[in-house]
């Protein structure tokens, strides 16, 4: 559990792309971000209040979040001075970098000296159980994709926001580093030991009110040979009542796997649903989320209409056209 | 890589059940075991030559293997004296215990003092890559089950032995602690971090001769919600050319999951094969291995005949009736 709210550290990010994590926090949990703090040569700007460390503290910030992907895996000395000063002033630090805060001797020393906590969200912190498979109360929705990086996190985040706006009970459950930094807690599933993967998702999504929806963040794809085991554990540990199928139709091959062609939405439905029904016989596929970023508006709308008719399911691009159709489908379950 | 041959330490095993690992080594790699060494109150006997540590060394043993499951997770002082003496005499130690050799200070000290190695086969020792999905040369066979503990390891071991006897090229590839201790190497897949599961199997089963078969040890089941992610990673990392379906027909529910009924062999075929064909479009289901230990001979034969006719596949219990039918099917591919 990372203490909120945050001050967002953008460091010397060369551009907005490098500030993806900070952008996610600003967009999905604006109440978690009191402002931004940047080094002189920073090329990213979130449009948040520019603050010093002291101003961040005065605004209530508890944690300085490194909201930027660093280059070359090195935490530079330019960062270090500011991070150590933050610890001295009483901040915790949180990061999802490849190289860990806890592996930096001077940060560890400062954290011990000043009583701060270093959160490396790539590393599991809890002891997870082996999955029991016992049915939990409450409802769960999981986005599964024909490939990695097709919009599964975005879909769950957008649906959570729109469900909350409608007065439905919904909680986004983070399973990756970006989601964990955005919400302050979750399971870094790709770093969990194999035997405990499904159990970590049971732990992440415990019993809840009958009318409460956990919107579990998807990972990988059953069709992506590098990460399919992670997806499988999400399907069985998550016990979803509802699956959303995610797709990016213009992709020429599976992400990072040039020899692997994309599978169809029908294949995804026919593969994921029977597997999900092992853990939850009532599970249904309720809708389709299409990432249409590489299509014109006319092409996107035509594609969504075609796929919706073909598969007899609501279909939308939640980024472009909102997630209402998908939320309607959940509400109707 | 654990140095062979071994001297098998049976400790104070109360009975043969507790000596499962040692029995596996004796049965499947008799050339790896020069003899057995026991404490006075040992209730297990492998029928191997009874040896002192010195006699084991004289017979060429390089590693003392703890071939027994300890009670209560404690390495007793009665064991310790002998293990430290073994290290002093030049042995390495190997174990698959829940509590690790490396967590015992006196064993670590003795290993450092005398230059021995402590092999905890539950713990991955190599840095595994993320799976690339690139097609490897050589052929691979994977046993998949309707449940855990239905005979997948036994099936692969028996087929490897019978293939070798026929002059076929075959290598058992261990993915669990027992298999690793038996053969001296492998990947403890259930302890590998999620992101590297499929990659660890690519690493375990590299390019090989076109007519060479890797017999990859299966783990878990696509239908067992606690471990299905591990099975998924084996299917995609293994790129099998051939699947063997494993089943134990008398089981009332999934192992350790009272609320989960057993799935059918047809469901296993229809689930596993399309997933395997993602990584290897040429993959085929070639046969069925049935664990008939709880059936009479007449019932077992009738069941095998029925299931073979129903699914148009060779079916046998390799423990009871040999694996020839399955090896024939591989040879015919």
Image: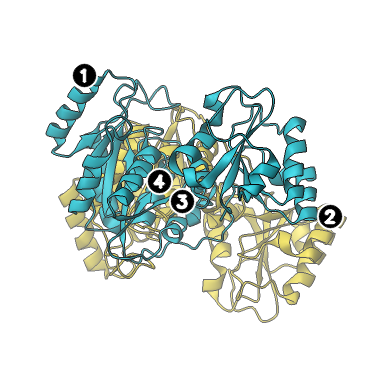
Chain colours: A cyan, B yellow
Can you identify the residue that label 4 sits on?
A217
Q: Is residue A2 above or below residue B21?
A: above
According to the picture, the residue beneath numbered tag 3 turns out to be B157
Residues at marks 4 and 2, common chain? Answer: no
Badge 3 marks a residue whose secondary structure is: helix
Question: Looking at this rendering, what residue extends furthest in the right direction?
Answer: B113
Name the quadrant containing residue A40: top right
Q: Are marks 4 and 3 on the same chain?
A: no
Residue bearing the label numbered 2: B112
Same-chain status of marks 3 and 1: no
Q: Quadrant of the N terminus of chain A?
A: bottom right
> Which residue of the protein is positioned furthest toward the bottom in this rendering?
B41
Quarter of the C terminus of chain A within the rendering: bottom left
Q: Position of residue B323 (x, y in %)?
A: 36, 51
Residue indicated by mark 1 = A298
User: Which tag is nearer the camera, tag 3 or tag 1?
Assistant: 1
């Amino acid at each position: 559990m990372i203490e909120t709210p945050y001050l967002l550290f953008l460091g010397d990010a060369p551009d907005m792309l490098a500030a993806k994590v900070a952008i996610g926090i600003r967009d999905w949990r604006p109440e978690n971000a009191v402002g931004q703090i940047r080094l002189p040569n920073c090329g990213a700007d979130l449009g948040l209040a520019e603050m010093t460390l002291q101003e961040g503290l005065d605004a209530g910030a508890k944690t300085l979040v490194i909201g930027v992907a660093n280059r070359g895996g090195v935490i530079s000395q330019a960062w270090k001075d500011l991070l150590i000063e933050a610890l001295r002033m009483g901040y915790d630090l949180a990061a999802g970098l490849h190289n860990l805060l806890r592996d930096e001797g001077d940060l560890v020393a400062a954290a011990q000296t000043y009583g701060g906590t270093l959160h490396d969200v790539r590393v599991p912190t809890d002891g997870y159980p082996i999955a029991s498979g016992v049915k939990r109360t409450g409802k769960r929705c999981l986005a599964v994709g024909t490939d990695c990086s097709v919009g599964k996190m975005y879909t769950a985040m957008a649906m959570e926001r729109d469900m909350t706006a409608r007065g439905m009970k919904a909680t986004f459950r983070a399973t990756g580093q970006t989601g964990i930094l955005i919400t302050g807690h979750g399971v870094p599933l790709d770093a969990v030991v194999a035997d405990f993967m499904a159990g970590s998702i049971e732990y992440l999504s415990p019993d809840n009110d009958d009318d409460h929806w956990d919107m579990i963040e998807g990972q990988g794809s059953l069709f992506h040979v590098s990460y399919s085991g992670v997806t499988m554990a999400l399907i069985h540990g998550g016990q979803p009542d509802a699956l959303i199928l995610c797709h990016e139709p213009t992709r020429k091959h599976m992400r990072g796997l040039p020899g692997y062609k994309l599978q169809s939405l029908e294949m995804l439905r026919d593969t994921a649903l029977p597997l999900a029904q092992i853990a939850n016989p009532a599970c249904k596929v309720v809708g389709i989320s299409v990432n249409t970023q590489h299509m014109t508006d006319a092409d996107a709308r035509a594609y969504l209409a075609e796929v919706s008719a073909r598969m007899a399911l609501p279909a939308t691009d939640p980024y472009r056209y909102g997630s209402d159709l998908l939320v309607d489908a959940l509400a109707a379950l």
